[in-house]
Amino acid sequence: MHYKFNHLRATGKYVAMCDGDDYWIDEYKLQKQYDYMEKNPDCSFVFHSAKIYDDANKKFDGEICYSAFDKLISNEHLFYGAGRTNPSSSIFYRKEFLDNPPNWFFKAPFGDTPTALILQTKGYIYFMAKHMSVYRVNVSVSWNNTIQNNKIKAIASQKKMIIILQEFNNYTNFRYDSDINKYCAKIKFQILKLQKDFNKMDIFKNYILRNYFRTLPIKKKIFFLLQHLTPAGYNLLKKSKRKFIS
């Protein structure tokens, strides 16, 4: 939707995205992103932190923050941009880099991820740590809320993303093959969780669980096992909000 109604009508050098249920909170946001892009022609897009606003409970509840500090993100590894990584309303990119996207771009269930996938092939990415927009959750009319509350649609959406990642793998001549395989394993695991009771699945017999488990670093493997074998204990640890759990 963004591409059809905004990108194709844009005539400027850059495009700044802003979803209908989100909003910007820094009057110099666009100037900061524009200045950085003008000084750094090798950068394909800039994004920043966002505050999370819970619309149902009418309060701010957390943040989306890729890093505690401004950070240059190399395109040597896959950057799987999504709403909880780089909120759509934080993205500022060079229009020419997305003027003629491949056909698979239009098959994606949502726009932020394929946008990030293509842009990272054009240059590096830059993250600004300052909160300059608000990402609203639990908005009754939002697309995300509709998907999250409908298991069938959520599963269909995840399956489409596997196809998109496979198409992107071909598009980049398998440049990110290892990273893409890891993300596909993660998505398959998420689909499995939607279809079945995670706590009743046999981690040692289910090949999807085994494949996903293999992709995890040691610390995450430990917490994965805790979540599976002792969910009550895992939830207590999660509530502590220690950084190494996230």
Image (cartoon, rainbow, N blue to C red):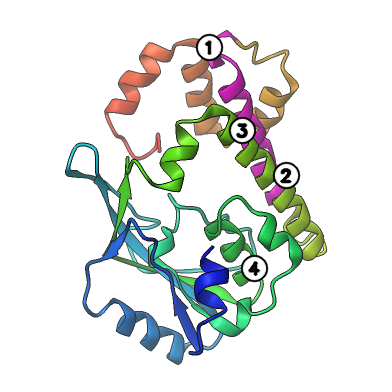
| Residue 153, picture quadrant | top right
Left or right, residue 110 beside residue 66: right
Q: Which residues are magenta?
A: 178-200
> Which residue in the protein does label 4 denote?
118
| Residue 38, picture quadrant | bottom left
> Which residue in the protein does label 2 denote?
181
Residue 13: give x, y in percent of width and height: 50, 89
Q: Amino acid at mark 2?
A: Asn
Closest to the camera, between mark 4 and mark 1, is: 4
Count neighbours of disc 4 (C-alpha within 10 A) and say few if under 14, some if 14 to 19, many if 20 or more: some
Residue at the left extreme, as displayed:
59
> Which residue in the protein does label 1 denote?
199
Q: Secondary structure at mark 3?
A: helix
Q: Secondary structure at mark 4?
A: helix
State which quarter of the image contains the N terminus.
bottom right
Residue 57 falls inside the magenta stretch: no
Q: Amino acid at mark 4?
A: Ile
Residue 133: give x, y in percent of width and height: 29, 63
Residue drawn at x 73%, y 13% as measured from the top left: 205
Looking at the image, do the residues carrying marks 4 and 2 touch, with CB atoms under 8 Å apart? no
Residue 194 falls inside the magenta stretch: yes
Q: Earlier in the sequence, mark 4 or mark 1?
A: 4
Q: Could you tell me what secondary structure mostly forms the magenta stretch? A: helix
Per the model, the C-alpha gap separating discs 4 and 2 is 17 Å
Q: Earlier in the sequence, mark 4 or mark 2?
A: 4
Left or right, residue 100 beside residue 26: right
